[in-house]
Image: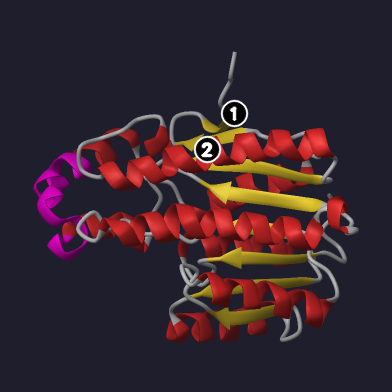
């Protein structure tokens, strides 16, 4: 998919993987990148910095708690009303909270499902649209589970299953929308640091040292590498239902289902 003339939306886009992806899309000359984030201060700071580098008209920040389904629906509607189209949806927003685990399910899985269905509503040929691409962010936690984040792990398993099943539906029904998943290992983001705190991890905070040992063993990736993987998923129009893994040892590669 050529990025020129395309409109993209990235959730959790003001920092970490989301921000790196926004920047990569803008460097690829995407017509408009709308980034959504719950943190208004960080979102406005990000927007100001993007304006300096890429110009004021190339990106838009919209504040939203993605777990609020009505608010997320309104965000998508605003985008298509203002820019006339939607081509790329990246469901990236995520948290790591084992103490208040319902929030983790709501943000990591429920809102991702909602964002995917909204993307289909505004891009699917089933609805008279031109098609597009959706990327759902999972994690290597879906392949290598650990005791410190059981609910987080469950959500990331769920992302892969949902993505692959819906990708098959898209192919069978001619939606014209490719749906893929990306599974990074440890990435240098604020989420990675959340394991330090009891208010995030609850009783599982006892495993924080084991978590740090795993980071030392497997290494920590930079968000820019994940953004590079995102662009590969967007560019390669043969990919649908693919699960991209990104690790320190193997870089960008794909999981094989035999």
Residue 26 higher or lower than 136, as above or below: below
Q: What stretch is highlighted in magenta?
A: 197-212
Q: In which quarter of the image is residue 100?
A: bottom left
For label 2, the crowd category at 10 Å Cα-Cα, with few meaning under 14, some 14 to 19 and many 20 or more, is many
Q: Mark 2 points at which residue?
A: 160
| Predominant SS along the magenta part | helix
Please indicate whether residue 175 sits to the left or right of residue 112 in the image: right
Kindly tell me whether residue 247 is visible in this rendering. yes
99 in relation to 244, above or below? below
Above or below, 214 relative to 221: above
Q: Which of 39 and 169 is in front in this view?
A: 169
State the SS at label 1: strand
Where is residue 208 drawn, in percent x and y? 15, 48
Can you tell which of label 1 and label 2 is closer to the viewer?
Answer: 2
Q: Residue 199: image x %, image y %?
A: 17, 65
Q: Residue at x 37, y 38 (%)?
A: 141
Name the residue at 16% across, 62% down.
Answer: 197
Which x, y percent locates residue 51? Answer: 66, 84
Which labelled disc corresponds to residue 254?
1
Residue furthest top in the image: 258
């Amino acid at each position: 998919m050529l990025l020129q003339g395309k409109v993209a939306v990235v959730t959790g886009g003001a920092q970490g993987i989301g921000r790196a992806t926004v920047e990569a899309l803008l460097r690829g000359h995407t017509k408009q990148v709308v980034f959504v984030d719950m943190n208004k201060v960080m979102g406005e700071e990000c927007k100001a910095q993007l304006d300096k580098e890429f110009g004021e008209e190339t990106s838009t920040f919209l504040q939203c708690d993605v777990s609020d389904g009505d608010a997320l629906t309104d965000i998508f509607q605003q985008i298509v009303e203002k820019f006339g189209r939607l081509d790329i949806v990246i469901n990236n927003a995520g948290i790591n909270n084992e103490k208040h685990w319902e929030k983790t399910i709501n943000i990591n899985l429920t809102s991702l499902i909602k964002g995917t269905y909204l993307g289909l509503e505004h891009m699917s040929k089933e609805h008279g649209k031109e098609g597009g691409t959706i990327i759902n962010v999972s994690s290597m936690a879906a392949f290598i589970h650990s005791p410190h984040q059981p609910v987080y792990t469950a959500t990331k398993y769920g992302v892969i299953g949902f993505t692959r099943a819906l990708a098959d539906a898209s192919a069978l029904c001619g939606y014209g929308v490719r749906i893929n998943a990306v599974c990074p290992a440890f990435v240098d983001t604020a989420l990675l640091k959340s394991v330090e705190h009891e208010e995030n991890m609850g009783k599982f905070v006892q495993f924080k040292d084991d978590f740090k040992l795993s980071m030392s063993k497997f290494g920590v990736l930079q968000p820019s590498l994940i953004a590079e993987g995102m662009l590969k998923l967007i560019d390669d129009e043969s990919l649908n239902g693919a699960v991209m893994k990104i690790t320190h040892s193997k870089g960008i590669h794909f999981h094989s289902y035999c």
